[in-house]
Amino acid sequence: MSRTMNPTPPAGAAVEAGQLPAVPLTLEGYPTLHQMMRFRWTAWRALPENDRREIVGEAERVLAEMEGRTHGQSALFSLLGHKGDLMFLHFRETFDQLNQAELDIARLRLNDFMEPATSYLSVIELGLYESSLKTYKAMADRGVEPHSDEWKKGIEETISRQKEAMKPRLFPAMPPNRYICFYPMDRKRGEDKNWYTLPMEERQRQMNEHGLVGRRYAGEVKQIITGSIGFDDWEWGVDLFADDPLVFKKLIYEMRFDHVSAVYALFGTFYIGLRCPANRLHDLLEGNLPQS
């Protein structure tokens, strides 16, 4: 009996067979922490004015140092609504430095008048759907086995090259805008609609369409996306910075009509805040809105 031998798969067969990795490459930048706080206004107002000034003076000096860091800055925002009173946003080079920022806030005398409302831990992230597809297919066409040493080397080269090109977006200065909008979000993983079962080409197409909307608002809003899978309860965090808060409503509403948002997106709690420079903390805690 003759035996039929399986022919050697042609180059690129892995692509046709859907055997390439489903996970897009990502770039990571600053670890990021949001701290939402409630302020004990009654206890604060009961203090003598001189005590309040001393406590604020200490906090202003620490916050000014955090604001003025060369790499990885912090900012303070006054929150609107019942979800909290203050929000600290920290960018740092390492998770250790994020924890130190928490400790620096905790040891302030002002911290005696603050209670944590919630927090969010993540890392600035850029998804590389297009580069991932090109890299995966190029190596598959050369017959490189996925996850082999040669494959991993090619991935490392792509990530290194892209990270250098994207450094300003991965390690940004704190945007100076008057208003911030922060919210967490997920992609659906249900039985009916599951983002993670879509082919990468389709996910890339939908994300490209989604990004076109954001680019139309490039002159009005600064967007920073952070990844939080494995770090917090949602998958991503979104920070929007603008000088006109109405742009948040317009941008997010328009994005609702994208297929990826309309079908696959879930959104968490929204927080809106106004920037409070360190040297205006006294005004804020005396009940006067810091002016831009």
Image (cartoon, rainbow, N blue to C red):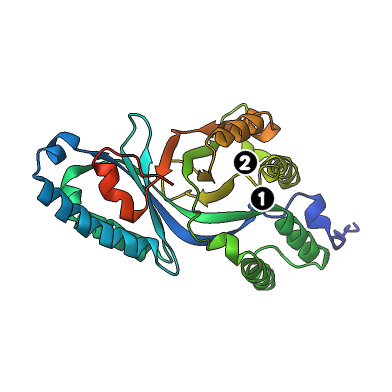
Distance Cα–Cα, label 2 vs label 1: 8 Å
Residue at mark 2? 196
- In this view of the protein, can residue 84 be seen by the observer? yes
Residue 173, horizontal then vertical, whole percent: 50, 61
Looking at the picture, tell me which residue is in the foreground, 23 or 41. 41
Residue 122, horizontal then vertical, whole percent: 45, 52
Looking at the picture, tell me which residue is in the foreground, 15 or 255. 255
Label for residue 269? Answer: none
Determine which quarter of the picture holds residue 14.
Answer: bottom right
| Amino acid type of the residue that numbered disc 1 sits on in the rendered structure | Ala
Relative to residue 111, is residue 74 drawn left or right?
A: right
Relative to residue 290, is residue 199 drawn left or right?
A: right
- In this view of the protein, can residue 189 be seen by the observer? no
Give neighbour class at mark 1: few <14, some 14-19, many 20+ (Cα, 10 Å): some
Looking at the picture, tell me which residue is in the foreground, 89 or 94. 89
Determine which quarter of the picture holds residue 102.
Answer: bottom left
Residue 174, horizontal then vertical, whole percent: 48, 57
Residue drawn at the location 50% of the way across and 54% of the way down: 175
- Earlier residue among tags 2 and 1: 1
Q: Are marks 2 and 1 in contact (CB under 8 Å)?
A: yes
Vertical placement of residue 77 versus 190, above or below: below
Residue at mark 1? 22
Image quadrant where one finds the N terminus: bottom right
| Amino acid type of the residue that numbered disc 2 sits on in the rendered structure | Tyr
Q: Secondary structure at mark 1?
A: loop
